[in-house]
Amino acid sequence: MDLTETAAGLLRRLTEEHGPLMFHQSGGCCDGSAPMCYPAGEFRTGAADVHLGDLTVDGVAAPIPVWMSASQFEYWRHTHITIDVVPGRGAGFSLEAPEGMRFLTRSRLLTLEELGVLGDV
């Protein structure tokens, strides 16, 4: 999992304003399929969610956890995810919406070597 420098810059600003953050990859419907950014703990996760890992952002004290529903993870488990941000307004409650920006997920299939590390080959 990665983060673009543009997304990291926005996360620095959002952290200054809102404190520690978290992401939950939306599964569709009203929000499309987008990484939704919330104050840490505001979106409740549970047994039906998979913790994909934590993003480390220079200048941000706390790592930013990234979550996805377990059912959606079954479709995405073979992809490398990069969180990016582009101009525009998303349709959800993600913290970047008032900034005139929206986070999005870029993905690519994992290489055979990466799959081997995960034990999926």
Image (cartoon, grey):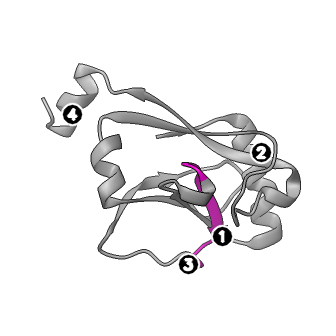
**Label 3 belongs to which residue?**
41
Give the amino acid type for the residue marked by disc 4 in the picture: Val
Residue topped by disc 4: 117
Q: Is residue 87 above or below residue 91?
A: above
Q: Position of residue 50 (x, y in %)?
A: 34, 61
Q: Splitting the image into 4 quarters, where does residue 64 fall?
A: bottom right
**Distance between the Cα atoms at labels 3 and 4?**
30 Å
Q: Badge 1: how crowded within 10 Å, few (<14), some, or many (20+)?
A: some
> Label 2: which residue?
9
What kind of residue is marked 2?
Answer: Gly
In the rendering, at what x and y percent does residue 21 appear? 63, 66
Q: Answer yes or no: do the residues labelled 3 and 4 have beta carbons within 8 Å?
A: no
Q: Is residue 41 magenta?
A: yes
Which residue is painted at 41% across and 34% down in the image?
Answer: 80
Q: Secondary structure at mark 1?
A: loop
Mark nearer the N terminus (3 vs 4): 3
